[in-house]
Amino acid sequence: MKMILRWFPFGDDSVTLDQIRQIPEITGVAGCLPKIPVGEEWTAEDIAALKSTVIAAGLEMEVIESVNIHEDIKKGLPTRDRYIDNYIKTITNLGAAGVRVLCYNFMPVMDWARSDLAKPLPDGSTAMAYVHDEVVKMNPDLIAKAMAGQSRGYSLPGWEPERLSLMAADIEYYQSFTQEMYWSNMKYFLDAVIPAARAANVRMAIHPDDPPWPLFGLPKVITDAERIRVFLSLNDSPYNGITFCTGSLGVNGANDLPAMLREFGGRIHFAHIRNVRKLGEKDFEESAHPTASGSLDMFGIVKALYESGFDKRFTGYIRPDHGRMIWGERARPGYGLYDRALGAVYIEGLWEAIGKMGGHKDD
């Protein structure tokens, strides 16, 4: 198992690589190139420049998240082939640079949604939160303005300016879509890129919908065990896998996360581990990582991941996911240093303890 942290380059992150290097047992970062427009190729030169920066800090860059998928691919428009060709070139370039996992999503229009990016918590910290009734009352423009207003000046993946101007029209476009049409477009994409991923030795790891329930009439993809089974059946290559995000899947009270981890362990290429506090059927706030801080059994989750063989077949990458803002830190919402560092060490402690209790020996 390798513990990593997500990091944003080009001064778009309050957290430095030197700080990440000092977190115990962190081996690398999940990198990104957010300045490249969605749908365009990530060139070998751009990737090499990013990697050299990471390597110079004494870290690895074996995971990328995310290379966003152009909306024309999701819609199945005739123009999709050009964007798929660019995606294949990007996968090839990433593989040549030593990237082994690519985390991406196929969510239409918006990658994720929250009603509050800095909800005050009783202990004085702040965290991202979601109240369903508040979100559905807002139109896309209001949501975009609310998100941008709380971003603290940092970019928000999935809420890029070029996407916001088209959001309302895109939402309207999908109202005529059936789930079967969306699955078909996903299969077309997978069948095109998975051979390239295999050739480049890059494992594709789709991220769940966040939140995992209907919103604005948009198609839903990765929300529960049944839909994950459908997704994996679209292309049965071992290079077609998932990013298991405990926060995204965990807010759906019907999801049995340990059971899902044991069922899909062989196709889980990346794990985002975080806790959430459920406040209602579709309301939640993000919490500190330990079990007692939220609604999820983090010991049971990490134990199931360990026992699933997550790191037996190939390297299993884990990162602590969204953290609170604590100790007066001002950072990108969800991506501060302190709470994620605490989360990483907590997960590492669970992993070591589970191994010494009788799990397989960690190589």
Image: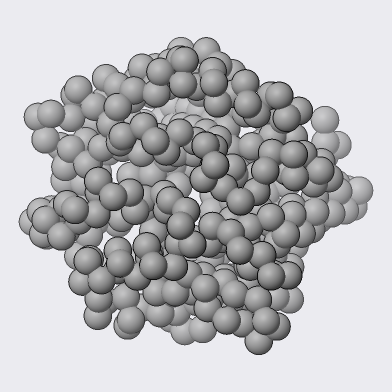
| Residue nearest the viewer, comparing 164 with 95 | 164
Q: Is residue 352 toward the left or the right of residue 63 in the image?
A: right
Quarter of the rendering containing residue 311:
top right
- Can residue 312 be seen? no
Q: From the viewer's side, name the closer residue of 314 and 144.
A: 144
Q: Position of residue 33 (x, y in %)?
A: 45, 33
State the residue at coordinates (54%, 18%).
Answer: 48
Which residue is at 83% across, 36% downward?
A: 362
Q: Depth check: 214 or 152 in front?
A: 152
Q: In this picture, is 282 found above or below 331?
A: below
Residue with the most extreme right position: 356
Rendered-image quadrant of the N terminus: top right
Q: Residue at x 43, y 51 (%)?
A: 155
The single residue placed furthest to the bottom in the displayed view is 122
Answer with left or right where residue 109 lies relative to residue 303.
left
Query: In percent of the image, x 44 and y 68: which residue is there?
Result: 150
Residue 120 falls in image quadrant = bottom right
- Percent position of residue 24, x then y: 83, 45
The spot of residue 266 in percent (x, y) is 58, 37
Q: How many marks?
A: 0
- Decide if residue 121 is in sight here: yes
Q: Is residue 309 above or below residue 194?
A: below
Vertical comparison of 55 with 73: above or below = above
The image shows residue 141 at horizontal and vertical percentages of: 22, 66
Q: Depth check: 192 or 29 in front?
A: 29
Q: Quadrant of the C terminus?
A: top right
Which quadrant of the structure image shows residue 4?
top right
In this picture the colour scheme is one colour
